Amino acid sequence: MNNYELIYIIDAALEEAARKDLIEKFNGVITANGGEVVKVEEWGKRRLAYAIDYKTEGYYVYVVFNASAELPKELSRNLGNNESVIRSQIVKLLTKKSSVKPRPVRVAPVVEAAPAAVAEEAPAAEAPAAPAEEAAPAEEAPAAQE
Amino acid sequence: MSEDRQARRPRGRKPRRKVCAFCVDKIEYIDYKDFRDVNSRMRRNISERGKILPRRMTGNCAKHQRQLSEAIKRARAIALLPYSVD
């Protein structure tokens, strides 16, 4: 079994119901061939960096799945046959390595720009900080007794 | 005369040793999906024309430059990045 990640672009003109069916269908292809869908992320409608078949917009779907080595071939054949899929790409996911999200300092200005995000993140940021403060005196206390 | 030339640098300012930005951030794997965000700092490695900037401009180390070029090419294939801008 290998981990793979798949990105495909659905025609933005396709209605929502048809799009949902399509996503279901491709998940079905994975499970039917002995694979396991780990995660499905819909990135939504995005501008394409360049026009593909004169289309400038596409609906991005990102899927992570486990499967044997034969499945990507079958899956990409299925994706290629479907006319609503503009483009697809399957990449082997490296489990060992992870991309570390860079520099929290740089993220800060972005958070300020979106006040809603601040409200959500603020409690989360405080929560880990509080136990750390509690832990510190606890460690000091036994040392003082000795 | 040749000594004199060596003593002072031939052209202006001292070359500063650049440090690989990916090494600084301890990034193990450069993800092509990070090009999703238009203002992502990953875009710093691409010229305005959409070309991959050379190592001598960005100061990336060889290991990360290799990963980066692979990531950019993947991002291009799925239309997250342009092949060319003009």
Image: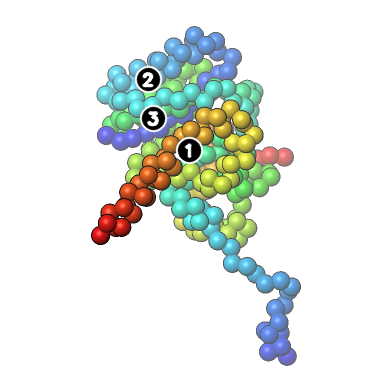
Circle 3 sits on which residue?
A64
Total marks placed: 3
Task: Give the camera-side residue of B83 and A81.
Answer: B83
- What's the mark number on residue A125? 1
Q: CA distance from mark 3 to mark 1?
A: 29 Å
> Which mark is nearer the camera, 2 or 1?
1
- Give, as a three-letter code, the residue at label 3: Val
- Give, as a three-letter code, the residue at label 1: Ala
Dividing the picture into quarters, in which one does residue A55 lie? top right
Residues flagged by tags 2 and 3 on a common chain: yes
- Check disc 3 and report its element: helix, strand or loop: strand
Q: Which residue is most to the front?
A: A145
Q: Position of residue A89 (x, y in %)?
A: 46, 31
Task: Give the camera-side residue of A112 and A67.
Answer: A112
Q: Position of residue A134 (x, y in %)?
A: 37, 44
Q: CA distance from mark 2 to mark 3?
A: 10 Å
Residue A127, above or below A24 = below
Residue drawn at x 62%, y 36% is: A112
Q: Dot 3 surroundings within 10 Å: few (below 14), some, or many (20 or more)?
A: many
Residue drawn at x 38%, y 26% is: A39
